[in-house]
Amino acid sequence: MTQSQTKLTRADFQIDGQVKWCAGCGGYPILAAVQKALPETGVTKENVVFISGIGCSSRFPYYMKTYGFHTLHGRALPIASGLKISRPDLHVWVATGDGDSMAIGGNHFIHTIRRNINLNIMIFNNKIYGLTKGQYSPTTPLGSITKTSPHGTIENPFLPGELTIAAQGTFFARVVDKEPKGMESVFIDAAKHDGTSVIEILQNCVIFNNDIHEQIVAKDVRDDRMILLEHDKKMIFGKENDKGLILDGQEIKAVKIGENGITMDDILVHDKKTQNPNIHYMLARMTYPELPVAIGVIRSVDQPTYEAMLDEQVEHAKKNSKIKDLKGLLHSGNIFEIK
């Protein structure tokens, strides 16, 4: 990716027109965090592209002063994949929602991740279809009353982190729309990751699913119901930092330090770089009230990218092929001339 010669600022990525989300939408702080994070990547504005599908989140390309492409419902990832493979110098971001990515785009989602194409995928997870006025989505909690589930949903919800890691994902993080600094930091980490980065954003929809994340993100409870994971640091949480996570057999368990003989030495240390996905998978699946919800970068490992391996394969074929150009191809094999 081409590096910018001059220091960019948020203003360089802000549009002159109006941003048209509902007042109070979680999209506003997400947009601001992205615009603040991009200058820290050092990439030129001309090399940044935002691609989206359909949904409230998918208006994102219109609100960024960069190149962009508003595609069809669920089809942002194949478009983004094709662009990145053909133009590996570009810095490609995908803005998608829990419906756009997990439902009609679900197949593209898992295959993009397993290929490890160098894309940054932001999932705006408000656990509802907002643009189409409040139908339940693949991440809507079991039993929820919505316009399309008047008696309560009877489908188990997807967990984006669970899907990402199960699809052999190399980067997964979770952030909250109420924490701009946390989002900005994670977006920078995702941009620097060489491979598919997936960032689940717990976003509020003030109109059709207001306060859906409030039981864990509200100021008076967040310290006890969320845990910020930091690489090489103990997994501790709580208002008094007196709670932590341990491995009890094959399960993660939340404990209170100082009770039942538990000491700081028993608390797990977060290692986002370990290739073994087992702990990352369990951390991504943690839900309240059984366990605190994990925030921050959960997994970030190094593996070859699809486009790098493809380029290597093409170069090898070109070097070892007897056919070097179109003329050579047309005159290869059994041929005849008409005179």
Image (cartoon, grey):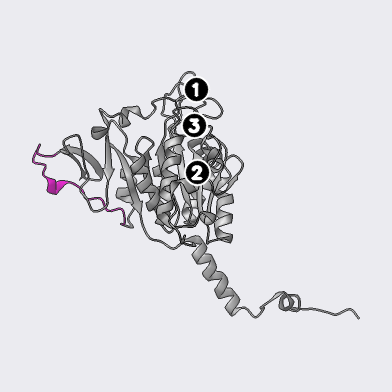
Distance between mark 2 and mark 1 Cα atoms: 39 Å
Please give the label number shown on residue 149. Answer: 1
Residue 177 as seen in the image, left or right of residue 82: left
Q: Which amino acid does label 3 sit on?
A: Ser
Front residue of 286 and 90:
90
Residue 28 as seen in the image, left or right of residue 273: right
Question: Overall secondary structure of the magenta stretch?
Answer: loop
- Secondary element at image label 1: loop
Distance between mark 1 and mark 3 Cα atoms: 10 Å
Mark toward the viewer: 3 or 2: 2
Residue pointed to by mark 2 = 14
Q: Is residue 111 above or below residue 99?
A: below
Q: In this view, does 129 lie above or below 278?
A: above
Residue 39 placement (x, y as % from top left): 43, 52
Q: Is residue 289 above or below residue 160?
A: above
Mark 1 or mark 3, which has the lower sequence index? 3
Q: How many other residues sit within 10 Å of disc 1, few (<14), some (14-19) or many (≥20)? A: few
Residue 258 lies within the magenta run? yes
Tell me, yes or no, whether the two marked residues, 3 and 2, touch with CB atoms within 8 Å: no
Mark toward the viewer: 2 or 1: 2
Q: What residue type is labelled 1?
A: Ser
Tell me where the magenta segment starts and ends, as one range: 257-273
Kindly indicate the quadrant of the structure image that contains residue 152.
top left
Distance between mark 3 and mark 2 Cα atoms: 31 Å
Q: What residue type is labelled 2?
A: Gln
Front residue of 252 and 8:
8
Front residue of 235 and 50:
50
Q: How many other residues sit within 10 Å of disc 2, few (<14), some (14-19) or many (≥20)? A: some
Residue pointed to by mark 3 = 137
